[in-house]
Structure formats: structure tokens, C-alpha cells
Image (cartoon, rainbow, N blue to C red):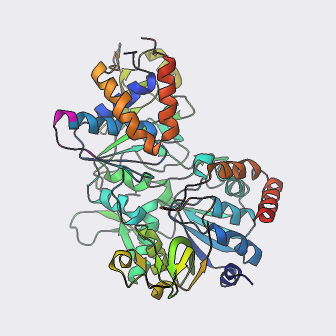
Amino acid sequence: MSDLRKMARLVESGMRVALPVDYAGVSMAMTRPLIERGAGNLDLVCVPTGGLQVDMLVGAGLVRSVETSAMSLGEAGGAPRFNQAIKDGAIVIRDATCPAIHAGLLAAQKGSPFVPMRGLIGTDVLKNRSDWKVIDNPFEETADPIVLIPAIKPDVAIFHVPLADRHGNVWIGRRRELAAMAYASAMTLVTAERIVDDSLLADETTAAGTLPALYVTQVAEAKHGARPYGLWGEYPADTQELLRYAREARTAEGFSAYMQTSAEAA
Amino acid sequence: MSPALPREILICTIARLLDGVRHVAVGASSPIPAAGAMLLRALKESAGAAPVKISILGSVEHNFFTNGSAELFDCAGQGRIDAFFLGGGQIDGHGNVNLVGVGDYPRSSVRWPGSFGAAYLYFVVPRVILFREEHTPRVFVDKVDFISAPGTSEPGVYRTGGPKALLTSKGLFSFDKEKAGFRLESVHPGHDLAEIQEATGFGFDHDAKPSQTPTPSPEVLSLLRGRVLDELSETYPEFAAQMRQTLTEREPVAS
């Protein structure tokens, strides 16, 4: 069994899964193993927005709910399977706003039950989130309503990075949201372009941008593991491929055909 | 020098709206706002004025952030971002913005990407410029189907930011916080008041004869067509190339 398939077996039905924004390091390499694994009823948390990977998991019928600030394929337009599922009422959507997702992860990172956040009051985003609460700022004498965002504690975070070492340390550079996801999650599964022998923590230049193995459950090598998304400092996104998916996945049949042919090509 | 193209007038108008900012943030896929910010930066630099910082999301060259995607919001929450741009699938006459979809939420008949950071940034960025090129009644509606971000807030709600202006392909509006409504400030060359009223699904204040949006001077245009387009092509290569091609074909605006 491949390392990726072994990692996918750690994901179980009903888990809350944190996935990164399209430019931060999406582990597209894990998408197919996750679909093959078939653990369903997943509650996805997009940090802070979702795209191709989320659309594929929705298309494969593995998703119960999506918490996100936005869903799209970027230049390739709307996310077809997600949009259809919304229209059909097949999944629960928890519309958020980017800093609320960051706030929820921060609360979990600190072991706090919630983090207060400005904005939101008077929006339909807040109105549709019964899990968010408005309180009166206890430090202010006059009325000052403020929203509390509860901790987001995913069961698993999954992402892709350029570099990892044999000790399980992974280099995330300036993509600090990947660290936030790992801090908040019970388990973190990482794919990496390269796995080196020397510890990333041994060199001060790489140590500061390294997420230590303390927060990492498993690492597997996956060359070009973010494709067709790009990976910072490594390769650009393959917009043509995203456009092809956007065209073909307009229907459920087209989606299945796409997944079939690209599986054979892989 | 050939006369300004409609998009060049938009870019120069944005630079004017941004005058005085220290730090402006531009979202992904926003070449015209980015060009406006870059033009302002170039103008300030040639005038020897205080520098303008620009953070373009999705750009490597024009982005200072090293703390992940949360940093923009942390910056904004502290008042470190003076201006930002918002679009919107629907925008109504009270400045409410809908980025989520059309019809009964959550089963929207048309679903757009989502609110992104708008439900926060609209509250804490002092100068939010609403920018939407498409000026039609389906965009500028009487009432939005979903409030991603409200134009105004009740007294007592913490709010240091909000809409300052609305710029479309047809005209420029200012936003009056007290009246919670828009006022047409100027009409772009080639358009008129009647056409704008026809294309806008909400009422707005205006002069009997609104003025025309100023066209840029040759000096500003040459800065825009030179340095700014060069800078823009790093983040928006296709947009910059397309503008250069249009300029070569010389399609001047009817004025």
C-alpha cells in the first residue's frame, strides 16, 4: 500500500477536516486516496476558502458540511459540484468570513473556548450562524456588542509543503496558516515535494519557518503534490487543467468521467 | 499621446480616490484597483511625497505579509490598512454588499464564491471603495438577497470603516453615511445621467447636470502606460498585455 493510501486510512467517517486555501499548499495528492478510502459524512473547514479539492470531495459524496468564507476555482470560475450540492440542499453550508475561521483556529490553538471578533454585526453571515454568539464587551461601560467565535478543533488537517525531514518536521515558510491548522487539529497529515535527511530545526534559516514534528502525525513524499494547484516557490498553477475540470464537472456524469480519466493518466 | 481609454479613466479615478492613504490592500483578481494603487504610488514618488504601501493578495512582489492569510485581517483590525476594494454580485442603495448568492439562502439559485473577508473588512477599513465595472439593474439592486457586509451599522456598533465611494464603468458615486445612500458625483465620458438611472436599481442623489469624470493629463497617462503597466504585469500579465494591445490598436474613448 502506498504511503498516501496509508495516511488516508487515518481519516474516518464523520471527522472534521481542515484544508488550506488554494495558494497555501493544498495536498491534491491526498484527494484520490481520500476518495478511495471512502470515509464519508466529513465536515470540511476551509482555511479560509475552498476550491478544487473540496469540490472533488463533495462530488464524490463524502461531505456532510462545508464551513468556508468562499468556494471557487479562481480564474476557472465557480466550484461546479459544490454549487450543485448547494442548489440540491445535499450539503450543509456554514458561510463564514476569513478572519472568523482564523479566530476559531486561534482559540483552539490557545486552548480557549472562543475568541472575540469585531465586524459581523448586522450581516446575514452572523444571522445564519447559531454557533456564534454576541455578547456585550465586559470591559466597556457603555454598550459594545461583540461576536464570539467558538474554537474550531478539527480532527485532522491535511496540507502539502515543499520540504520535510526524516524526523517529521515540515517547512511551511511564511504560510503560517498551515501552522495554525496543525496547532488546532488533533492530527496533521502532510505531503511534501521532498523529504531530506538533515533536521530542518538544525539550521536557523529553516527553523523559523518550520512546523515541528510535535504537531505532525505523518508525512509522505508526493512530487508535484499540489497540482493542478501551484506551490509557493516551486511551480505555478495549471490553469488549463482547472478550466478543464470546471468544464467537465458541470454534470455528475462529467465529474465521474473526469475522475476516471485523470486517475488513469496518473 | 492618444486619449484615455475607459479603463484608464477608471484607474486614474481610483488613484484619486486613494489620495492620502499610507497602506492600501487589494484583493486577488482585481487588476484595475491594483493599477490605481500603483499609479498613486508612482505619482507620490515622483512628487517626493510620503510613500504609499500596497499589499496585493496573490502577488509575491507586492506583498509584505509573512504571517499567513490571517495577517491582512490583523493589520486591518488595528487600523493599519487605510483602503480596500470590494466588489459584489449585488450592491444596494444602502451600501449593503452581497457576495453569497441570489434567491433564498442557503439554497441559492445562483451561488457566488462567498463573503471572503468582507464581513470584517467593511467594518474596520476606513476607506472602502466599491468597484464593479458591470453597471446593470441586476447588480445594483433595491435590496440585496444576502447581506455579506452592511453599508451602515446601528449606533453603538464598533465601526471604524465603511464605504466611501462606488465606481462603475458608467460613473462615480460617493456614499453618505448619515443618509445611508449614494450620490452620483460624476459621469464618465460617453455616458449620461438618464442611462445611469436606467441601469441602477436604486435611487440616488445627483445634480441636475452631473459633472463629467475628469480625464487624466498626458503626464499621468504616460506614467500609467509606462511604469504602472510594467509593474502590473508581474501580478496580472494577461490584463497588462491586453491593455497594451488595446492601446496599440488605439481605441480612444468618445469624448
Residue B47 included in the magenta stretch of the image: yes
* Relative side of A157 to B172, left or right: right
Q: Position of residue B196 (x, y in %)?
A: 47, 21
Residue B3 is left or right of residue B103, and the answer is: left
| Viewer-side residue, A15 vs B231 | B231
Q: Residue at x 51, y 23 (%)?
A: B246
Res. A113 visible in picture? no
In the rendered image of this protein, does residue A24 appear above or below residue B34?
below
Q: Is residue B159 left or right of residue A256?
A: left
Residue A242 screen position, x and y as percent: 66, 52
Q: Position of residue B233 (x, y in %)?
A: 44, 40
Secondary structure mostly seen in magenta is loop
* Residues shaded magenta: B46-53
Q: Is residue A259 above or below residue A214?
A: above
> At 47% from the left edge and 86% from the top edge, which residue is drawn?
A213
Residue A214 to residue B65: above or below: below
| Position above or below: B31 against A153 | above
Q: Is residue A110 within the magenta segment?
A: no
| Along the line of sight, the residue nearer the viewer: B38 or B162 | B38
User: Residue, x 44% and y 65% (percent of image)?
Assistant: A100
Quadrant of the drawing holding the N terminus of chain B: top left
Q: Is residue B21 among the parts visible in the rendering?
A: yes
Residue A144 is drawn in which quadrant?
bottom left
